[in-house]
Amino acid sequence: MIRVLIADDQALLRGSFRLLVDSTPDFTTVGEAGTGVEAVALTTEHRPDVVLMDVRMPEMDGIEATRRICGDPATAGTRVVILTTFDLDEYVYGALRAGASGFLLKDTPPADLLAGIRVVAAGEGLLAPTVTRRLIDEFARRPEPTRPLPRRPEGVTDREREVLTLIGRGLSNAELAGHLGLSLATVKTHVGRLLTKLAVRDRAQLVIVAYETGLVGPGGLRWADHLSEKSP
């Protein structure tokens, strides 16, 4: 059973999302929050698997609420999906930096929303296509990487660096396996090791690292000469 908390300042939308969630097998709503403060409190109380979080809420906005939820060891197992009508750059970047695992617009079709919840509950990251483009645009305006990654960061292999770069380009695990000539199980192992070594929560955070360190840029690969096709 995937347990969902719905946080939105509009009661009508909360009710609509709740109806959608509760009418879906193996989904259940554990609470509704009308403010960011309530979202944090109810997450601490109920420990949902996924929080559907609005950005613009009274008392505390969704980004700050996300930061508190993701930064609290007590709620570290909860994933946050940002839902908003505003796909503005500052929301995308701020939400992901706060620890959100997904970012979707409120006009996302119901079936896609439910599929997104499943993806995030399983530990994957989720970005709508328009959001991905805006994220790339955001980094395009940044002249230099903000978190320089050494040529050979301690503990990260050449192959893992290559996997991280391709994750930043938006490749799925299946696409990674095909591109690198590896089994899906091996790819999942590399991704899991990157999550541990880079101390990030999920795939969405790996995308942030790939861009912030300059491994990936809006024009394609950077540092491509640092990658080794022969690495283990």
Image (tube, helix red, strand yellow):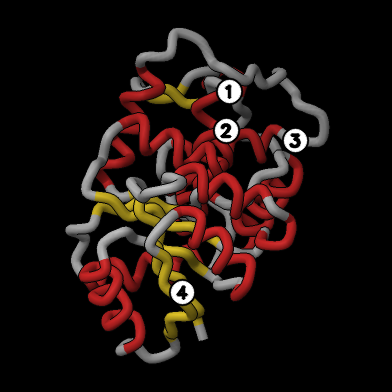
Amino acid type shown at disc 1: Thr
Q: Mark 2: which secondary structure? A: helix
Nearer to us in this view, 106 or 223? 106
Q: Mark 3: which secondary structure? A: loop
Amino acid type shown at disc 3: Val
Mark 4 or 2 closer to N-term? Answer: 4
Residue occupying image coordinates x 68% and y 57%: 189
- Image position, residue 77 (x, y; %): 65, 64
Q: Nearer the viewer, mark 3 or mark 2?
A: 2
Residue that badge 3 annotates: 156
Q: CA distance from mark 3 to mark 2?
A: 13 Å
User: Looking at the image, do the residues carrying marks 2 and 1 touch, with CB atoms under 8 Å apart?
Assistant: yes
- Circle 2 residues within 10 Å: few <14, some 14–19, many ≥20: many
- Circle 1 residues within 10 Å: few <14, some 14–19, many ≥20: some
Residue occupying image coordinates x 42% and y 66%: 33
Q: Nearer the viewer, mark 3 or mark 1?
A: 1
Residue that badge 1 annotates: 213
Residue that badge 4 annotates: 4
